[in-house]
């Protein structure tokens, strides 16, 4: 039994396709692949990433895509342009925050992000396919596999999975990253960018910083072992 997982994508379509290819070479075209979320923002082709994953699922590929905090921004903006994510400590709107990557996402849909908010909303509603907005808004918050729990940011220790708050699942850091708790299964997550994917005793962080010009992580999880997939094959990822 094995599970493949891919870290935060952030609009990096070419890196996503390359990560899929590494997985196909290791496990074949029907490999079960879980994506930890953050499909959009910052990178150059958020639209292409969403379309690629949609097409794969429509074609019947066993691809699981969980919801990241960034995946909430675009559909929420289209539905309620004044919505501000409660997880943002800055209290800034998605299109106003310089570090969230809204401009790159909007440009990938052919929308000029520098226009006034009212015309920006109209342009975005015309440009973003309804299917893309529905896909992002409906992404599951977690995926439980016999080998791992895949979730974007992490979980709140001591809370049953069925009762976890969405804001924690897509935003949590403090209380999860520093927890030594045995979660009963390896938690595979992203959200907190590192210089490289890192395997801890109770979790695996696959956000290697693709949003910042670093590689997009792809890993294979088997009983008792985790390997990073590289262009040269498997590389062991021991517990640190």
Image (tube, rainbow, N blue to C red):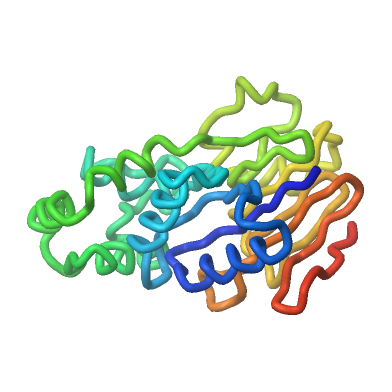
100 vs 169: above or below: below
Report x, y in % for residue 177.
73, 48
Q: Residue at x 77, y 34 (%)?
A: 146
Between 186 and 52, the one nearer to me in the picture: 52
Q: Residue at x 24, y 63 (%)?
A: 109
Using residue 125 as the reference point, say whether residue 3 is left or right of it: right
Using residue 157 as the reference point, say whether residue 166 is left or right of it: left
Q: Residue at x 46, y 56 (%)?
A: 39
Q: Residue at x 52, y 67 (%)?
A: 17
| Quarter in which the N terminus is drawn | top right
Report x, y in % for residue 221.
78, 51
| Quarter in which the C terminus is drawn | bottom right
Between 36 and 120, the one nearer to me in the picture: 36
Report x, y in % for residue 143.
62, 36
- Residue 156: image quadrant is top right
Q: How many marks?
A: 0
- Residue 181: image quadrant is top right
Between 75 and 232, the one nearer to me in the picture: 232
- Residue 214: image quadrant is bottom right
Using residue 114 as the reference point, say whether residue 172 is left or right of it: right
228 vs 137: above or below: below
Report x, y in % for residue 175.
71, 40
41 vs 160: above or below: below
């Amino acid at each position: 039994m094995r599970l493949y997982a891919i870290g935060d994508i952030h609009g990096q379509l070419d890196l996503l396709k390359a990560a899929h290819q590494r997985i196909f070479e290791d496990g074949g075209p029907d490999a079960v692949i879980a994506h930890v979320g953050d499909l959009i923002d910052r990178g150059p082709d958020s639209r292409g990433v969403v379309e690629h994953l949609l097409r794969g699922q429509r074609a019947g590929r066993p691809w699981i895509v969980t919801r990241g905090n960034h995946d909430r921004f675009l559909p929420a903006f289209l539905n309620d342009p004044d919505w501000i994510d409660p997880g943002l400590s800055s209290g800034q709107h998605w299109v106003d925050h310089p570090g969230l990557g809204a401009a790159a996402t909007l440009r990938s849909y052919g929308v000029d992000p520098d226009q006034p908010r009212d015309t920006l909303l109209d342009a975005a509603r015309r440009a973003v396919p309804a299917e893309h907005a529905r896909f992002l808004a409906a992404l599951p918050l977690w995926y439980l596999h016999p080998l791992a729990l895949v979730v974007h940011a992490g979980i709140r220790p001591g809370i049953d999975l069925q009762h976890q708050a969405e804001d924690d699942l897509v935003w949590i850091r403090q209380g999860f990253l520093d927890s030594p708790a045995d979660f009963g299964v390896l938690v595979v997550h992203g959200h907190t960018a590192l210089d490289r994917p890192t395997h801890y005793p109770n979790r695996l962080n696959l956000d290697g910083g693709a949003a910042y010009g670093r590689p997009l992580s792809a890993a294979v999880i088997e009983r008792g072992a985790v390997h990073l997939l590289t262009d040269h094959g498997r590389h062991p990822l021991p517990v640190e």
